Image: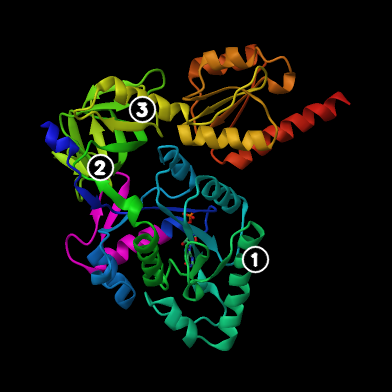
Amino acid sequence: MSDTDSTSQSDTLRTPIVAVLGHVDHGKTSLLDKIRGSAVSEGEAGAITQHIGATAVPLDTVSQMAGSLVKPEDFDLPGLLFIDTPGHHSFSTLRSRGGALADIAILVVDVNDSFQPQTEEAIDILKRTGTPFIVAANKIDTTPGWNPQEGAPIQKTYEEQSQRARSKLDEKLYEIIGELSDRGFSSDFYWRVQNFQSNIGVVPVSALTGEGIPDLLGVLMGLSQRYMKDEMAIDVAGPGSGTVLEVKEERGFGATLDVVLYDGTIRAGDTVVVGGANDPIVTEVRALLQPRPNAEIRTEKRFDKVEEVRAAAGVKIAAPDLEDAMAGAPVRVVGDRDLDEVVREVEAELADIEVTTEEEGVVVKADTLGSLEAMANALQEAEVPILRAEVGDVAPRDVAVASTAREPEHKVILGFNVDVLSNAEAELDKNDVKLFEDDVIYQLVEEYEDHVNEMKRAQQ
Ligand code: GDP
């Protein structure tokens, strides 16, 4: 690439990245499936594009699904990119430059269940990262007397429901609005919201019947177009920036990275810098891979090689030396910049992930940088000091570190979404170190707190 290429600004608007959060069983997966499914049945080939870790729904398809709520001529954003893995775990893993990678979030709340522990956690994370969000008040089809209209815009059908069904639903929606208000967010039925920046739109939906999904898409598009255009402007020809979603072994490729690219372009052959468990990894992209449509799981031909990928997109990167790469770490294409400068950038970004450790405390292991940070935050709130916090499986070294804690209640390892290496297992007993494991943060913290309370009771 010549110098002039890299300095010329070719600003383009990229696709906003959308994440789905909410309590378990509130309907996150169903909602994503419904959006994908309706998109496919709406259009022919090309209605959606399946990326690694994400699904792109182009503006035309969004507009077909949303009907009069999204007129293509009113928009210059290219569509929406939905992160496929719902939940705040993947949300906090996907960071970019200290903030959230997702530009916008859908908080799914079951109208029958309202706010639950993971709804609270999701709200905390959204607040901390300053991510704009809308609420999908899900499962409205379960409202007594509700007369469902498959795939219809909700504002219209809401008006057409019986008085009884409407007031039943209103009661539940106002409960959600009240919960949001208790946490400092003003919100309203989306069709009464004038300014989506200061007011959160609540969209009643059913992931089962598809009711309200046109509105949900309309609000997402409108909000992005109106308030987020500046953030969507990227130098698409510039060197790519992304975040590692997952590090995966793939047959024939070795360790690979599932990456969400949020800026610029990445090409096969590019030199990239990736955040590693020890030092930044400098390597060369051997192949860029996308899922092959309808590929058989067991065949080796599960991926198609592509020459380049432009943001926003999900892609698998095959390259040497990726074993130590960490989920949640940054990926940067070097381009014609100075390699040392890019390495420093990656280091600075990793240093930005706040985990405060102390002289005395517990050992924390987590599967990704984002979850490590979320764990550290939760422990800080519970006033539990941390001696060491790292990404990775529980290894004998961690047991050795935990055993150096002075207080018996700190001779503990908290493992979030990680495995325990077999040679570490035996060490636990030998060193009198307790291990707690879970894949829900608040449960893990609760288990630890219960343990401490039990110890205290036993001492009395
Ligand atoms: P997740 O854990 O948040 O991803 O929740 P799921 O999408 O797995 O949904 C949990 C359960 O709720 C499943 O049994 C779904 O079929 C059901 N469900 C999800 N959305 C709806 C809805 O809109 N209406 C009804 N009646 N059931 C739903």
Q: Is residue 155 above or below residue 446?
A: below
Q: CA distance from mark 1 to mark 3?
A: 43 Å
Can the viewer see residue 368?
no
Q: Is residue 108 left or right of residue 51?
A: right
Disc 2 Cβ-to-ligand 1 distance below 8 Å: no
Quadrant where the N terminus sits is: top left
Q: Say which mark, if any, is on residue 178.
A: 1
Residue interval drawn in magenta: 31-58
Going from N to C along the chain, the mark reached first, 3 or 2, is: 2
Residues marked 1 and 2 touching at CB (< 8 Å): no
Residues marked 1 and 3 touching at CB (< 8 Å): no
The residue identified by callout 2 is 297
- Which is closer to the viewer, label 1 or label 3? 3
Looking at the picture, how far across and down is residue 68, in whole percent? 31, 78
**Residue lying farthest to the right in this orientation:** 460
Amino acid residing under circle 3: Glu
Write the residue at 46% across / 26% down.
351
Crowding at dot 3, Cα within 10 Å, few <14 / some 14-19 / many 20+, comes out as some
Write the residue at 59% across / 14% down.
401
Amino acid residing under circle 2: Ile
Q: Is residue 39 left or right of residue 84?
A: left
Looking at the picture, how far across and down is residue 4, in whole percent? 12, 36
SS for tag 1?
A: helix
Amino acid residing under circle 1: Gly
The residue identified by callout 3 is 345
